[in-house]
Image (cartoon, rainbow, N blue to C red):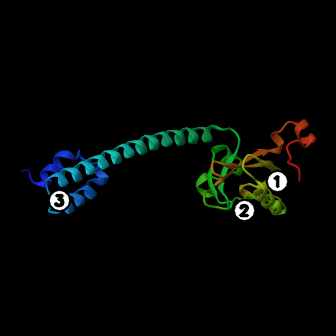
Amino acid sequence: MRSRPDVLARTIPSPPEAFSDEVEQLLKRLNGSAEGAQAEELAEELRVAAEHVREQLDAVERLTKSVQALHGRHEELFTLVPEPLIYTDRVGTMRDVNPAGEELLQRERRFLIGKPLVVLIARDDVATFRRLADSVRPGAPCEEELEIERSGGARERVILTASLTGRAHYILWSARPLQLLPRRVRRSGTYRSPA
C-alpha cells in the first residue's frame, strides 16, 4: 500500500501559488489521521476543492483584467474631455481633476488632490455650493451658477453641475465657464436647476 502523502500528492493537482501553504498544512494534518479508502476519499475532496479554488482564481483574474481595462479607458476619456471635471468623495475632498479642470482652476492636479473643493468656491457662494452638494441624488444631476477662485485670487463664474457616479461614492463636478456659454443660454437661465 502506498503511503498517504504519496496518494494525496498524486491526486491533488498543483494548487495555485497563494493556496499552496494551506494545502501543505492540510496534507500534514491528514498525514497519520486517515487510512486506505478514507485517505483516498480525503485526497479526492482536496483535489476537487483545489480545482474549485483554481477556477475561482482564474475568474477573479479575468475580472481584474477586465476592470483594469475599463479603468484605463475611463482615465483616458477623463483626461481627454475638454470640459473641466473634478471628482470628489461625498464629503467634498477632491480625488481627481482632469487637465481642463487644472487649466480652469490654474492649479496643478497635485496641489488639488486631497483638498476640499469648497476652498475653491467664492466665499459668497459657499452656502449655495453646500446646498448643491447636499441635493445631488442618483440619476438627478443638479447645477448652479457659482463663482470659483482661481490661483492668484482671480474669480470665474461657472455653471457647476454635480452628479453621483457609480455606487454614489463619488460626485463628478463639471465646471462650465459662464463666459463660454452661448448668450441665449445665459439669458434664458436654462442652465440653472430649480431652487
Image spot of residue 163 (x, y percent): 72, 48
- Mark 2 residue type: Val
Q: Are marks 2 and 1 in contact (CB under 8 Å)?
A: no
Relative to 7, residue 134 above or below = below
**Secondary structure beneath disc 3?**
loop
Residue on which disc 3 sits: 34
Neighbour tally class for label 3: few under 14, some 14-19, many 20 plus, Cα within 10 Å: some
Q: Nearer the viewer, residue 18 or 5?
A: 5
User: Can residue 87 be seen here?
Assistant: yes
Query: What element does badge 2 sit on?
Result: helix
Residue sitting at x 48%, y 39%: 66
Above or below: residue 136 compared with residue 186: below
Spot occupied by residue 72 in the image (x, y as percentages of width and height) = 52, 40
Q: Which mark is residue 23?
A: none
Count of marks, rendered view: 3
CB of mark 3 within 8 Å of CB of mark 2?
no
Give the amino acid at mark 3: Ala
Amino acid at pointer 1: Leu
